[in-house]
Amino acid sequence: MSPSAVILEAKSRLARARSVTVLTGAGISADSGIPTFRGADGLWRNFRAEDLATPEAFARDPRLVWEWYNWRRELIATKQPNAAHRALVELEGRHDRFLLITQNVDGLHRAAGSNKLLEIHGNIWKVRCTICKQVAENREVPIALPPHCRACHGLVRPHIVWFGEALEEESLDRSMGAVASCDVMLIIGTSGVVNPAASFAGIAKAAGAFVIEINLDDQPQSAMVDLMIGGRAAETVPLLL
Ligand code: NAD
Ligand code: ZN
């Protein structure tokens, strides 16, 4: 199929769908200037994300982990949603049965106006107390270190699902439900190596959905999708409407 035929096919599948589920990853926000973890500019002081975004790293050196998050908060605070985030808001308006599942923690989908949204990996603008578990919004940039809980003065951590941690059960149930019951699944800008999101394409396909992927390059899940759209999210997602 030619690139324009691929776009037409995706567009008509979406227009006919009774229910749509979307999964996004760091690639959609790359077009807003936020580095992906696996991209060339994803490193901070030579640490890899996998060395910092873990409960073990936080237990060993909470200040170091918070310094990294302060760097990311500073960077993300200056970024805006792009045309792909906005197109997904429009898509949500066209379908009663719609869910946008994002692995991103940057809050750009909400900033764009998405409501049927599940931030399965949490949000960088929220903190959670390590003692009383209370979750609070915190938009300080940079956050004063070490940050403490307003309720019990315990140390707070980012309200983010780290490597090696499980998703909240409700998040997992709602995403699995939406993935297993949609007619069309759209997968945008994710490498598909982090579970459970990595399994979503397979689950949607097994349940009979038509799966469309948008990414700069082929990914492990690309072999099983029905339609692969190669290109930048901000340029290609708006073409689907
Ligand atoms: P990833 O870094 O593993 O993969 C990014 C994917 O996006 C790659 O497949 C890449 O080819 C693709 N991509 C890059 N630029 C693109 C563009 N302009 N258009 C379309 N595709 C593009 O990210 P992931 O799969 O989301 O998973 C890693 C974890 O990283 C997640 O848990 C997420 O929470 C976290 N993360 C989040 C952010 C954010 O919130 N913006 C940023 C970095 C990492
Ligand atoms: Zn507390």
Image (tube, rainbow, N blue to C red):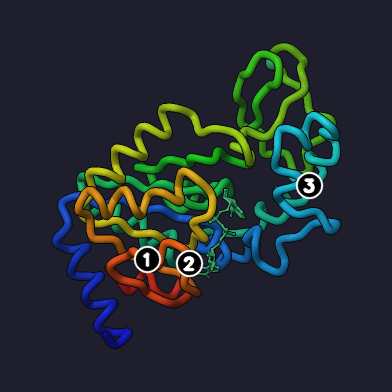
- Of badges 2 and 3, nearer the viewer stands 2
CB-based contact (under 8 Å), mark 2 and mark 3:
no
Give the numbered dot on residue 240: none
Residue under numbered circle 1: 213
Disc 2 within 8 angstroms of ligand 1 (CB): yes
Q: Residues within 10 Å of mark 2 (few under 14, many from 20)?
A: some
**Vertical placement of 226 versus 151: above or below?**
below
Q: Is residue 4 above or below residue 115?
A: below
CB contact under 8 Å: marks 1 and 3: no
Tell whether label 2 touches label 1 (CB within 8 Å): yes
For label 3, the residue is: 68
Please report whichever mark, 1 or 2, sits nearer to the chain's N-terminal start.
1
* Secondary structure beneath label 1: strand
Say what secondary structure mark 3 lies in: helix
- Quarter of image, res 85: bottom left
The residue that label 2 is drawn on is: 219
